[in-house]
Image: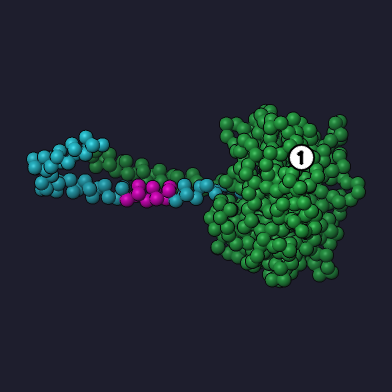
Chain colours: A cyan, B green
Amino acid sequence: MIKNPSNRFGRRLADKAAIGLSLLCMVHCLLLPLAFTLIPALLATNLGDERVQLWLVLVAVPISAFA
Amino acid sequence: MDRRRFLQATGTAFGALVASGCAIRPLIPVNTTASIYGGLEPDPQGLLDLPNGFSYQVISRLGDKMDDGGTVPDNADGMGCFDVGNGHLALVRNHELIPGDDAGGQLAEGYGTRHGEVLPGGTTHIRLDAKTLQVETQFRSLAGTIRNCSGGITPWGSWLSCEESPTGPGQRYGEGLANNHGWVFEVPANTRGLVAAIPLTALGRFNHEAACVDPDTGVVYLTEDRDDSVLYRFLPKFPGQLSKGGQIQAMSAVGVPDIRNWKPTQQPVGRSWPIRWIDLENTDAPADDLRTRAAALGATLIARGEGIHMGEQELYVCSTSGGRAKLGQILRLKPGYGRKQDSLELFFESESKDQFNFGDNLTVAPNGHLVVCEDQYTEVVDNHLRGITPAGEAYPLARLRLQTELAGACFSPDGSFLFVNTYSPTHTLAISGPWDWAVA
């Protein structure tokens, strides 16, 4: 059977985007369990320290006000 | 989220990925054998005889008032059909008019003039409802050109309109002309009026007939209507942006300097040859000698390259007067896409006038047959639409009862209608019928 062409012209960019997103999805799926195992280790950091909170406020408030 | 829900979620994601891989795999068509629709029934209107089950309606004709104040011009030739959204189609129709012909009204602007007057060649647009075929608007969309014979659709939604007229100031037929002609022009399908007529000079200057674009690569294939023509292709620097330049090449079938089959040594139908492509320089060809320079470099000679149509990773070329009987050939070119060498096949060659007589424009029907418009050059003509099966068997599909040619055959994107022109007087017809019918 002779066939008319599938118009893939505009799809090449979409194909690349789809491949990229699929790869991103795979990386996400592979790394997420690792990230979960590291959650307890976050307790050993200083992220909960009051001084960290204070510095975050001092940075965030002026930028928010300006924006 | 717990471990079980996490595994469920990731499992679903990977499952969806696997399933999507299956879903995009193309469906394999059911194998069917050739379909022939039976005898042609005389048309009471005396215009077009069709097989039982088919009918036509005239959607536009010479002299119809258009919405830009002009009237539909004569010499309707190549044509493309586009889905322009919201349930509408656009037909872009060439008019093969020469200086002095009636343009169908005063033209506001265009590419070229003769003695200050905008030249009459160009295109008209018909926007119509995709289901009812009710014409919404008709207008002139390209002007200032000469002998717009055929052309081709692009996968990015435009029509390439080809000037079959390498002439200009100081050249044959060039008296009074302001510019050189023999170019290709691009007309977007979604335009609502006259477009800026800018020649795509990178596509070369010669006796242009038709063009088709490979949607996989953006490469443009071009025919030339000459007894000693060659087949060209244009490799764009940027696919889809033809005005930004590229390289023109000519086709050489290895070991076949001449495929016209006019000499005692003849090439058999069904045989294929690997092909190579020859770079061409000075493609604006002021002396209109591009084909002869290409042949001198080894390009294969073709008899009157006319219609050209892209299929699925292959394209079909009509050689109007090729073959031992000089009644027409159809060539099939298969690009190799870097995986293998491109090849050329002599797909069909007519042996008698009853079989196939001077094919010109062609397209592919939903049932997988070629549909070819005949354009005979005898004093009295008997032009048909010919179907050609994938096995290379020709059969009559319609018979024109007027003394003119059929041209511009193209299907609506959904395959419901075949649009076709009668050249002079201009009629644009929509033919409906069992186009997807394939009898085992």
Q: Residues within 10 Å of mark 1 (few under 14, many from 20)?
A: many
> Residue A5 versus residue B36: which sits nearer the camera?
A5
Instruction: Name the outermost residue toward the left.
Output: A50
Q: Is residue B139 left or right of residue B61?
A: left
> Residue B284 versus residue B261: which sits nearer the camera?
B284
Question: Magenta segment range?
Answer: A17-27
Q: Which residue is located at x 8 percent, y 42 percent?
A: A51
Q: Quadrant of residue B118?
A: top right
Question: Can you say which quadrant of the picture contains the N terminus of chain B?
Answer: top left
Question: Looking at the picture, which amino acid does disc 1 mark?
Answer: Ala
Is B411 drawn above or below residue B389 in the view shown?
above
Q: Is residue B311 left or right of residue B16?
A: right
Is B249 drawn above or below residue B317 in the view shown?
below
Q: Which residue is located at x 69 percent, y 62 percent?
A: B285
Q: Which residue is located at x 68 percent, y 47 percent?
A: B111
Instruction: Return the x and y of residue B232 as percentages of the image width and height.
Output: 67, 60
In the picture of the structure, the residue carrying the numbered disc 1 is B103
Q: Is disc 1 placed on a helix, strand or loop?
A: loop
Is B227 drawn above or below residue A24 in the view shown?
below
Q: Quadrant of residue B35?
A: top right
From where the camera sits, is residue B351 visible? yes
Instruction: Return the x and y of residue B348 as percentages of the image width and height.
Output: 76, 56
From where the camera sits, is residue B34 visible? no
Question: Can you say which quadrant of the picture contains the C terminus of chain B?
Answer: top right
Instruction: Return the x and y of residue B221 as percentages of the image width and height.
Output: 65, 56
In magenta segment, residue B126: no
Q: Main secondary structure of the magenta part?
A: helix
